[in-house]
């Protein structure tokens, strides 16, 4: 009996499915397999404000000198602020096919669900602030969806409240503001990069942080971020690797051959506010 074209097509489909079943399938991607340490990233407010005064953040900045700051600023003018707590490894870019820095682990964005009147919300609005025109909550939600969702497997960080409580806890433990002041690393001055790094290394009991700078159109470099690396259990500081981002060469690694300008945090201009 001759097979019909329909029967032959059916057999081809079955054969194809059987062949596919013999191909090893990649295991589902688990977020914990893509990070082996955490990076607590801290902002220097005035440099961040200069970034937001410039239209393109990843290009050389113009440090627009005024007697006031065009951004909301901490009331304590020696105070660093939080950028975020990032699960990381030593690759720059994470994709489902390759290990790397974890980004956007959850495709569907969560809504922000921390009570606006809670002590945690007050801490976030004091220490994790935005320097653009958007509201702080936009930054908080961004940090949760981009980084916090990557560690929802951890019982100590499996909700927005727990993740941000851990972020604030670590910031209060590793905030370098007072230590820099005590060691006479003062805003409004410039320093050799190695001196700055060594002071922070002492603060972290021998662990080397990652220090980033922003380059100006004049060729100066402004201190931008201190990135403190912590082991996967968040128990101890560890040495950071030095990342290089070819997409944004002026927003990243400080050039060790030149001094680093540590700009003074200024009072907010009219229309902006001090944050205490």
Image (tube, grey):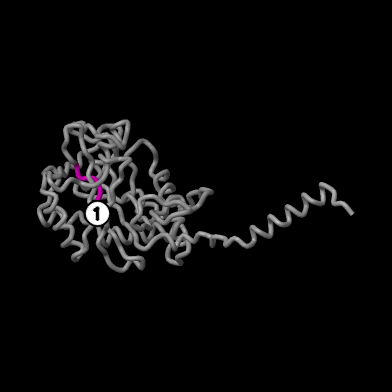
Picture coordinates of residue 64 (x, y %)? 21, 31
In terms of secondary structure, what is the magenta stretch mainly? strand
Q: Is residue 166 left or right of residue 10?
A: left
- Residue drawn where x is 57% and y is 60% of the image: 25
Whether the magenta-drawn stretch holds residue 223 is answered as: yes
- Residue drawn where x is 14% and y is 58% of the image: 198
Q: Nearer the viewer, residue 176 or 36?
A: 36
Q: Nearer the viewer, residue 113 or 36?
A: 36
Rendered image quadrant of residue 73: top left
Identify the image quadrant of the N terminus. bottom right
Vertical arrangement, residue 206 with respect to residue 116, above or below: below
Q: Residue furthest front?
A: 1
Whether the magenta-drawn stretch holds residue 80 is answered as: no
Rendered image quadrant of residue 174: bottom left
- Residue drawn where x is 50% and y is 52% of the image: 106
Q: Is residue 164 left or right of residue 249?
A: right
Picture coordinates of residue 26 (x, y %)? 54, 60
Q: Which residues are magenta?
A: 222-226
Count of numbered tags: 1
Vertical arrangement, residue 79 with respect to residue 218, above or below: below
Rendered image quadrant of residue 119: bottom left
Q: Nearer the viewer, residue 192 or 257?
A: 257
Q: Nearer the viewer, residue 196 or 182?
A: 196
Mark yes or no: residue 245 visible.
Answer: yes
Q: Is residue 81 left or right of residue 222?
A: right
Q: Is residue 12 left or right of residue 234?
A: right
Mark yes or no: residue 75 visible.
Answer: no
Residues packed near mark 1 inside 10 Å, few (<14), some (14 to 19) or many (20 plus)? many
Pointer 1 residue: 210
Q: Residue furthest right?
A: 1
Picture coordinates of residue 61 (x, y %)? 24, 34
* SS at circle 1: strand
């Amino acid at each position: 009996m001759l097979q019909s074209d329909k029967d032959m097509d059916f057999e081809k489909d079955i054969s194809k499915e059987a062949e596919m079943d013999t191909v090893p399938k990649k295991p589902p991607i688990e977020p914990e397999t893509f990070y082996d340490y955490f990076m607590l990233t801290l902002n220097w407010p005035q440099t961040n404000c200069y970034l937001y005064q410039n239209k393109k953040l990843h290009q050389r900045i113009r440090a627009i000198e005024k007697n006031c700051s065009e951004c909301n600023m901490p009331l304590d003018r020696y105070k660093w602020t939080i950028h975020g707590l990032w699960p990381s490894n030593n690759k720059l870019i994470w994709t489902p096919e390759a290990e790397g820095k974890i980004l956007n682990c959850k495709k569907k964005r969560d809504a922000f669900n921390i009570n606006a009147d809670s002590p945690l919300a007050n801490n976030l609005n004091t220490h994790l602030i935005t320097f653009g025109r958007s509201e702080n909550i936009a930054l908080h939600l961004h940090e949760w969806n981009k980084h916090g969702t990557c560690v929802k497997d951890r019982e100590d960080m499996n909700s927005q409240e727990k993740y941000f409580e851990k972020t604030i806890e670590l910031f209060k433990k590793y905030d370098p503001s007072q230590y820099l002041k005590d060691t006479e690393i003062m805003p409004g001055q410039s320093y050799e990069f190695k001196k700055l790094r060594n002071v922070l290394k002492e603060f972290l009991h021998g662990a080397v942080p990652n220090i980033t700078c922003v380059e100006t159109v004049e060729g100066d470099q402004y201190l931008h971020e201190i990135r403190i690396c912590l082991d996967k259990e968040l128990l101890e500081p560890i040495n950071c690797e030095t990342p290089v981002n070819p997409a944004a060469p002026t927003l990243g690694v400080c050039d060790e051959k030149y001094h680093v300008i540590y700009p003074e945090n200024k009072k907010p201009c009219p229309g902006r506010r001090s944050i205490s």
